[in-house]
């Protein structure tokens, strides 16, 4: 048996050159929350999600089912590992990253 799941990535896109989009931390999250509440599909949130606590709160508030990161992962590809550390989760780090792993919280 093959089980698959789907999620809708909610973003305003910024594709229209004259669109006015107020950019602030989590600015796309309200769109995700609206779609999540009105549809029977899981959604992901994007939009200046840069702090582990911010991402966690979006999930705790059930504004989205998943967090998608773009520019933050370009700046820091190990962001999820550091976020887990900050939030107190003990996740395995790849062997090649072990020396960069924070030791204390």
Image (cartoon, grey):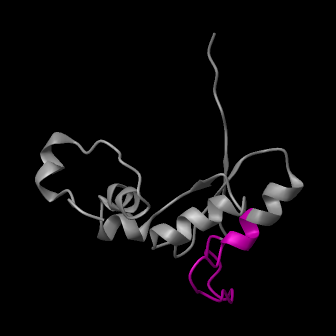
Relative to 54, say whether 9 is above or below.
above
Q: What's the residue at 72%, 47% (across, down)?
A: 42
Task: Describe residue 62's horizontal placement relative to residue 74 as left or right.
Answer: right
Segment colored magenta: 13-32
Task: Describe residue 20's horizontal placement relative to residue 86 as left or right.
Answer: right
Say which quadrant the C terminus sits in: bottom left
Q: What's the residue at 47%, 62% (across, down)?
A: 69
**Whole-percent x, y for residue 88 in the image:** 41, 57
Q: What's the residue at 46%, 73% (across, down)?
A: 51
The furthest residue to the front:
104
Relative to 91, say whether 13 is above or below.
below
**Whole-percent x, y for residue 61 in the image:** 71, 64
Numbered-mark total: 0
> Is residue 85 inside the magenta stretch?
no
Q: Main secondary structure of the magenta part?
A: loop
The furthest residue to the top:
1
**Whole-percent x, y for residue 11 in the image:** 65, 66
Task: Describe residue 64's horizontal placement relative to residue 23 as left or right.
Answer: right
Q: What's the residue at 53%, 58% (across, down)?
A: 68
Say which quadrant the N terminus sits in: top right
Q: Nearer the viewer, residue 102 or 16?
A: 102
Q: Nearer the viewer, residue 25 or 21?
A: 25
**Whole-percent x, y for residue 33 in the image:** 76, 64
Relative to 89, say whether 87 is above or below.
below
> Is residue 31 inside the magenta stretch?
yes
Image quadrant assignment for residue 26: bottom right
Q: Nearer the viewer, residue 44 or 96?
A: 96
């Amino acid at each position: 048996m093959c089980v698959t799941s789907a999620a809708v990535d909610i973003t305003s896109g910024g594709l229209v050159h004259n669109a006015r989009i107020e950019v602030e931390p989590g600015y796309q999250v309200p769109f995700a929350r609206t779609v999540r509440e009105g549809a029977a599909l899981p959604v992901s949130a994007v939009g200046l999600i840069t702090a582990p606590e911010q991402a966690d709160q979006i999930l705790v508030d059930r504004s989205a089912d998943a967090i998608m990161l773009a520019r933050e992962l370009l700046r820091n590809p190990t962001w999820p590992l550091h976020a887990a550390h900050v939030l107190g989760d003990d996740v395995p780090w790849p062997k090649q990253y072990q020396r960069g792993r924070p030791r204390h919280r």
